Image: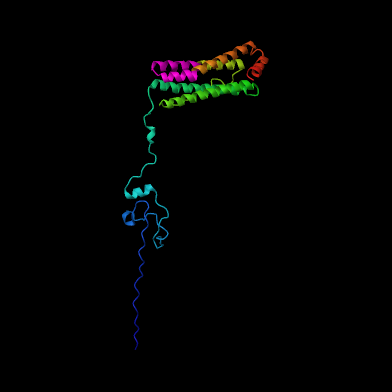
C-alpha cells in the first residue's frame, strides 16, 4: 500500500522594500511625516508601482506641508514695506501747504473737466464752431497738464498725493461764444486766485522753493491766459454777439481759425 506525501506549501513571496522618495521640500521620509505620506520629488529611476502605494507627481502646497509639520505658512499678503516708510526727501514742506497743493490739483482738474464740456458743446452739429471747440479743448488739456505737474512736484518734495472727487460742470449747454468765453474767463480768475492764496501760504510758512515753483510755472502762464480770454471777449462784444450770428461765425473763422 502506497501512502501519498503532500509537499508543504512554499513560503509567501516577500517584495523588496521600496526605495524612498527623493526629498525636495524638507520632509525627509514617510516616518517623519505624522500622516505617513511621502512627499513628491521621486525620480523616474526610484518610482515603483506596488499595491497600495502611490507616489505623488507634484509636491503638496506649502500650506499643507506646513500644517503637517506643525509650522505656520508665510503670508503672501503681507503689507509692503515701503507703504509705511516715512518720506526721505521731505524738507520744509508744511502740512498746510501739502493739503493746499492737493486741493489746487483738484481745482485744476475740475477746470479741465469744465473746459472739455465747453469744447464738446461747440462741436455739436447744431452749434458747429470747430475752431472755438479746438481752442477750448487746448485750454482743457493745458489745465490737465498743470494738475499733473503739481502732483509730480508734490511727490518730488516728499509730500503725499491725496486725490479728491471732481465735481461735474455746472452746465451742459454753454450758449454762444461770448457766454462760454466769459465763463472760461471767470473760471481762470478762480484758478488764479487759488494760486495766489497758495503763494501767500507758502510765504507765511517760509517755503521759498514752493514760491519759486508757482511763480515760474503757473502765475506767469495764468496772466497770459487771462489776457487772451479778455481780448476774445472784447472782440466778440465788438462784433455784437449774440445779436449777430454772422459775427460769431467770423470770429470763429478768422480769429481762432
Residue 215 appears at what percent x and percent y? 47, 17
On the rendered structure, is 21 left or right of 109?
A: left
Of residues 16 and 97, the one drawn nearer to the viewer in this rendering: 97
User: Magenta stretch containing residue 206, yes or no?
Assistant: yes
Residue 130 appears at what percent x and percent y? 64, 22
Residue 70 appears at what percent x and percent y? 31, 48
Of residues 2 and 179, the one drawn nearer to the viewer in this rendering: 179
Q: Residue furthest right?
A: 246
Q: Which residue is depicted at the point 41% across and 16% down?
A: 203
Residue 153 appears at what percent x and percent y? 45, 25
Res. 154 image quadrant: top left
Span of residues in magenta: 190-218
User: Do we see residue 166 in this rendering?
Assistant: no
On the rendered structure, is 18 left or right of 114?
A: left
Where does the N terminus fall, quadrant-wise?
bottom left
Q: Which residue is depicted at the point 57% across and 13% down?
A: 230
Count numbered badges in the picture: 0
User: Magenta stretch containing residue 215, yes or no?
Assistant: yes
Amino acid at each position: 500500500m502506497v501512502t501519498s506525501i503532500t509537499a508543504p506549501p512554499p513560503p509567501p513571496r516577500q517584495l523588496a522594500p521600496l526605495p524612498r522618495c527623493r526629498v525636495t521640500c524638507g520632509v525627509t521620509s514617510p516616518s517623519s511625516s505624522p500622516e505617513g505620506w511621502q512627499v513628491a520629488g521621486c525620480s523616474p529611476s526610484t518610482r515603483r508601482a506596488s499595491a497600495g502605494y502611490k507616489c505623488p507627481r507634484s509636491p503638496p502646497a506649502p500650506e499643507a506641508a506646513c500644517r503637517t509639520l506643525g509650522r505656520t505658512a508665510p503670508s503672501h499678503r503681507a503689507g509692503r514695506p515701503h507703504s509705511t516708510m516715512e518720506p526721505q526727501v521731505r524738507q520744509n514742506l508744511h502740512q498746510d501747504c501739502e493739503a493746499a497743493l492737493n486741493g489746487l490739483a483738484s481745482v485744476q482738474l475740475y477746470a479741465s473737466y469744465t473746459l472739455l464740456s465747453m469744447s464738446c458743446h461747440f462741436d455739436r452739429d447744431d452749434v458747429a464752431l470747430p475752431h472755438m471747440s479746438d481752442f477750448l479743448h487746448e485750454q482743457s488739456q493745458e489745465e490737465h497738464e498743470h494738475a499733473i505737474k503739481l502732483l509730480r512736484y508734490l511727490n518730488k518734495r516728499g509730500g503725499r498725493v491725496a486725490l479728491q472727487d471732481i465735481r461735474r460742470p455746472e452746465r451742459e449747454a454753454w450758449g454762444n461764444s461770448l457766454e462760454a468765453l466769459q465763463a472760461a474767463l471767470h473760471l481762470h480768475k478762480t484758478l488764479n486766485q487759488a494760486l495766489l492764496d497758495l503763494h501767500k501760504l507758502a510765504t507765511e510758512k517760509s517755503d521759498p522753493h514752493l514760491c519759486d515753483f508757482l511763480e515760474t510755472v503757473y502765475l506767469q502762464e495764468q496772466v497770459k491766459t487771462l489776457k487772451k480770454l479778455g481780448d476774445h471777449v472784447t472782440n466778440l462784444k465788438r462784433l455784437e454777439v449774440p445779436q449777430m450770428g454772422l459775427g460769431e461765425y467770423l470770429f470763429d473763422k478768422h480769429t481762432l481759425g
